[in-house]
Image (spheres, rainbow, N blue to C red):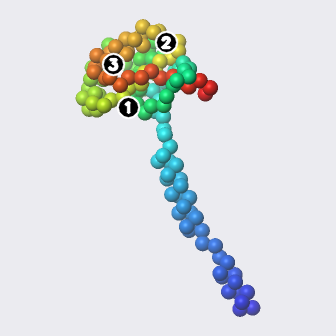
Amino acid sequence: MRKTLRQREEMELNIAPLIDMMFILLIFFVVSASFVREAGIEVQRPRARTAETKKPNVIVAVTAEDRVFLEGREVDPRALRGIMERLRGENPSLQVVIAADRHSSTGLVIEVLDQLRLAGIENVSLSALREGK
């Protein structure tokens, strides 16, 4: 009888290390996951085979109704230059992505691009969906 009790005591499973390991894995996946910031407005981006993933500091959205949004706030395209100059002063290596709706006017997208370049921002990209997604 004593032998049976000792075997039961030895067969207990300590799950504390298993729980620790699960928390470490969970933290690893949360930290390493890439979270994509959106412009705060829904746009239907065009598709491109050569689209790449980038991590911009700022996203400027141009909607199908030809409205311009900067980080979810509507802005006048003419005021964009001043805002971006201030942001570039805070972060000289600023990366900006223009998320233009496929039905937006090309003239407005070019105007936004021009305002960004006049503000001294050199790293500007256009957002597109990779074909097949």
Residue at x 28% of width, y 21% of height: 120
Q: In this image, 20 relative to 80: left or right?
A: right
Mark 3 residue element: helix
Q: Is residue 86 above or below residue 104?
A: below
The amino acid beneath tag 1 is: Asn
Residue 104 - label:
2
Query: What separation in Å lies between label 1 and label 3 (alpha carbons)?
Result: 13 Å
Q: Position of residue 15 (x, y in %)?
A: 60, 68
Lower sequence index among marks 1 and 3: 1
Q: Quadrant of the C terminus?
A: top right
Mark whose residue sits in front, 2 or 3: 3
The amino acid beneath tag 2 is: Ser
Residues 125 and 58: in front is 125
The residue sitting at the right extreme is 1
Residue named by callout 3: 116
The residue sitting at the bottom extreme is 2
Residue 131 - label:
none
Mark 1 neighbour class, 10 Å CA radius: few under 14, some 14 to 19, many 20 or more? some
Lower sequence index among marks 1 and 2: 1
Residues 114 and 49: in front is 49
Res 10 → quadrant: bottom right
Q: In this image, 68 relative to 21: left or right?
A: left
Q: Is residue 55 above or below residue 24?
A: above
Lower sequence index among marks 2 and 3: 2
Residue 57 - label:
1
**Can the viewer see residue 70?**
no
Q: Position of residue 122 (x, y in %)?
A: 32, 23
